[in-house]
Image: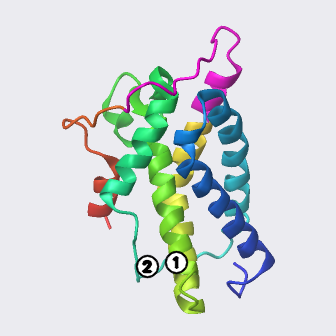
Amino acid sequence: MPSTPHSKENLEFITVAAEFCLFLEQIPEINKHQFLSHAVKYLPLLYLKTSLLLDDTDETETEPERIVTETDYEILRESVASVLGMDDNYLEVFHPDMQYSDTPIAVTVSENMADIYQELKDFLYNCQLGDDEAMQNALTYCLVSFRTHWGQKLLNSLRALHQVLYNENNNIEDNTEISPTQPDDSRDISFFKHQRNK
């Protein structure tokens, strides 16, 4: 990893992370096709900029300050679920519970996007504190989480969104009027599960 939090690679990652978070925050203002066409460009760029920082990443024992609340998480998740409509759900063969199941497990792009948003937004907040040590710690934490948590969700979502955007038999309709998906109490929302596992 570059020795300074202000290296070119780190600043490029910060820029892409900030743009991606802003994109997700503006979902209520865009339609489904706009979301898909932007998301399939942001996700691989974010993956690339993150992976370039992974060399020699060590574990950090100090969890950085967290600012994304449960409400923030749910609002973001519902926005993505609303714009995607029925295409929010997809079958995931890489889910951790898959080893106990004979069939693929249904998951949602919206939860994946909210998980990624949470990690990046918390990281960006720590960057704004003006403390190089806090920034470096938050970066390390974010990169470790990428390896163990949100990197795979990013790739899974990209695969699902690619299928929706480029499937010749799928006419994309603008779902701007669809009501946000209501939380399912029987489902363990990954935000809470992720927090408990820390």
Q: Is the magenta stretch mostly helix, strand or loop?
A: loop
| Left or right, residue 95 beside residue 6 | left
Residue 138, label in figure: 1
Q: Which residue was labeled with disc 2?
A: 64
Q: Where is residue 81 in the image (x, y as percent from the top left)?
A: 44, 34
Label 2 amino acid? Answer: Pro
Residue 172 is one of the magenta-drawn residues: yes
Q: Can residue 91 be seen?
A: yes
Disc count in the image? 2
- In the displayed structure, 41 sits above or below 193; it is above
Magenta span:
159-180
Residue 45 part of the magenta segment: no
Name the foreground residue: 12 vs 106. 12
Quadrant showing the C terminus: bottom left
The answer for how far apart the CA atoms under marks 2 and 1 are is 5 Å
Residue 166 point in image, percent of width and height: 71, 21
The numbered dot on residue 176 is: none
Please identify the quarter of the rendering in which residue 187 is found: top left
